[in-house]
Image (cartoon, helix red, strand yellow):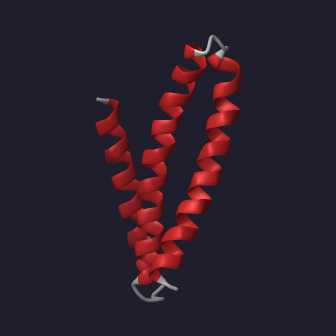
């Protein structure tokens, strides 16, 4: 049930931001890069956010202490990497 919510949230955010980036009028590549990057990033961040506490609990570690910083670090690194990969595939 939460997966459907994450997909809907990712789709909504990517469509809104992609539609707004069309207004800048720099061609088709920026809206595609931005909206697909946001969509993939939200899905992966939500997946990691659900998996990290589960994994930490499995190894008998306190998920409350490490889950927040670990998830934020992974989300930031993945989001930046996703934008660069999509941009390099579409532009370069």
Instruction: Return the residue found at the far front.
Output: 59
Asked whether residue 23 appears in the rendered view, the answer is no
Task: Tell me where residue 32 sits by quadrant.
Answer: bottom left
Residue at left offset 43%, top offset 82%: 29
Q: Nearer the viewer, residue 41 or 51?
A: 51
Vertical arrangement, residue 6 with respect to residue 26, above or below: above
Vertical arrangement, residue 2 with respect to residue 25, above or below: above
Vertical arrangement, residue 5 with respect to residue 44, above or below: above
Q: Nearer the viewer, residue 77 or 31?
A: 77
Vertical arrangement, residue 73 with respect to residue 90, above or below: above
Residue at left offset 33%, top offset 45%: 7
Pick the quarter of the image with the N terminus: top left
Residue 28 at x, y percent in the picture = 39, 84
Task: Tell me where residue 23 sits by quadrant.
Answer: bottom left
How many marks on residues? 0
Give left or right: position of 91 versus 67.
left
Asked whether residue 60 appears in the rendered view, the answer is yes
Residue at left offset 47%, top offset 62%: 37
Residue at left offset 41%, top offset 69%: 18
Residue 91 at x, y percent in the picture = 49, 84
Instruction: Return the residue found at the far top.
Output: 60
Give left or right: position of 60 versus 28.
right
């Amino acid at each position: 049930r939460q997966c459907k919510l994450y997909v809907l949230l990712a789709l909504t955010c990517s469509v809104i931001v992609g539609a707004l980036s069309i207004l800048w009028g720099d061609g088709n590549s920026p809206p595609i890069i931005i909206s697909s990057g946001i969509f993939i990033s939200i899905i992966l961040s939500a997946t990691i956010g659900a998996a990290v506490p589960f994994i930490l609990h499995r190894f008998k570690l306190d998920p409350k202490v490490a889950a927040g910083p670990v998830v934020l670090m992974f989300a930031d690194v993945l989001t930046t990497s996703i934008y660069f990969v999509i941009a390099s595939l579409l532009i370069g």
